[in-house]
Image (cartoon, grey):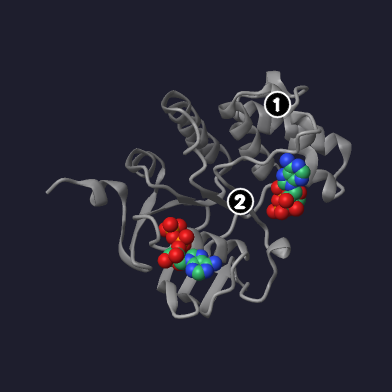
Amino acid sequence: MAKVSLQSITRKYGNVTAIDDITFEIPDGEFWVLVGPSGCGKSTILRTIAGLEKATSGKLYIGETLVNNIPARQRDVAMVFQNYALYPHMSVAENLAFGLKMRQESPTDINHRIQEVAHALNIEHLLKRKPKQLSGGQQQRVALGRAIARKPQVFLLDEPLSNLDAQLRDDTRAELKQLHYRVGITTVYVTHDQVEAMTLGDRIVVLKDGKIQQIDTPQAIYATP
Ligand code: ADP
Ligand code: ADP
C-alpha cells in the first residue's frame, strides 16, 4: 500500500474543466470516498490516479513516486467498475489467478493467494465455476478478488455496487469493508450512495463542478446540524 497525493490536479477537455485544482493526500491504507452529483469530476479523478487520463496540470504521487508520466500498466493500481468484466472462458480460480500468472509468480504462491482472497470474499465454493454460472453479486465479488489478488498498492472502485439489487449491495458492501479491514490497501471509492459513503469511508471528499467542497470524516459530513 502507498499514500496517494494529488497536488493541484486539473484536467481540461477543450474548454471544459472536468476537475479543477484538486489537492488531497490519502495516507497509506486509508479508504476514501468521492461523492457528488453526476458530472462533478469523480470518475476523472479516479481515472487520473489510474493513469487512464493525463492531468492537464498538477502533480500526482503514488507513494514517493511522481507518476504523471508513468503509464497505467506500470502503476501498481487496480480498478473495478460497475460492470465487472470477468474473463468468460476462465473459471473463477483462473480469473483470480490471472494477474499473478502475468507476474510469473510460483504456482504454490498463486494457489495460496487464491485461497486467501476466496476466503476473504466468501467465494471458496465457487472457484471451479465459470462466470456465467454465477449471480451478479458473486461475479462482482470475483471481480473485486481479481483486482486485489496481486496486492496492488492502490485500489480504485467506480460505483462497483450500483448494478446489484439492494440486498446484494448491502452484503457486498459489508464484505468490501471486511476485505479492506483485512488487507488495508489504500482505496479510492466513487459513489452516489450516502450509505456506502458513510459506512465505508475513513474520509469523504465532496465534489461539485470539478472542485472540492469539503473533505472530512463521514460523521462530520453527514452530521445534521
Ligand atoms: P462524474 O464521474 O462525477 O460523473 P466525470 O469525471 O465523468 O464526472 O466528468 C466531469 C466533467 O468532465 C463532466 O462535465 C463531463 O462531461 C466532462 N468529461 C468527462 N470526460 C470527458 C471527455 N472524455 N471529453 C469531454 N468531457 C468530458
Ligand atoms: P487491465 O486492462 O487493467 O489489465 P484486465 O486485466 O481486466 O484490466 O484486462 C486485460 C485485458 O483483457 C483488457 O484489454 C480488457 O479489455 C480485456 N478483458 C477484460 N475483460 C475481458 C473479458 N471478459 N473477456 C475478454 N477480454 C477481457
- Image point 49% across, 31% down: which residue? 164
Please identify the quarter of the rendering in which residue 109 is found: top right
The image shows residue 194, relative to residue 134, as above or below, that is below
Give percent across and percent down for residue 62. Answer: 59, 66
Q: Is residue 87 left or right of residue 186?
A: right
Give percent across and percent down for residue 126. Answer: 70, 21
Q: Is residue 66 left or right of residue 71?
A: left
Q: Is residue 94 left or right of residue 24?
A: right
Q: Is residue 77 left or right of residue 159?
A: right
Q: Earlier in the sequence, mark 2 or mark 1?
A: 2
Q: Residue furthest left?
A: 225
- Image point 75% across, 38% down: which residue? 87
Tell me the amino acid under the disc marked 2: Met
Give percent across and percent down for residue 97. Answer: 78, 38
Q: Secondary structure at mark 1?
A: helix
111 and 23: which one is in front? Answer: 23
Within 8 Å: ligand 2 and the Cβ of disc 2? yes
82 and 114: which one is in front? Answer: 82
Neighbour class for label 1 at 10 Å: few (<14), some, many (≥20)? few
The residues bearing labels 2 and 1 have C-alpha atoms spaced at a distance of: 21 Å
Give percent across and percent down for residue 145. Answer: 65, 37
Tell me the amino acid under the disc marked 1: Lys
Q: Secondary structure at mark 2?
A: strand
The image shows residue 83, relative to residue 60, as above or below, that is above
| Foreground: disc 2 or disc 1 | 1
Q: Residue furthest top?
A: 125
- In the picture, the disc for residue 79 is 2
Neighbour class for label 2 at 10 Å: few (<14), some, many (≥20)? many
- Identify residue for label 1: 132
Location of the N terminus (image quadrant): bottom right
Is residue 84 visible in the rendered structure shown here?
yes
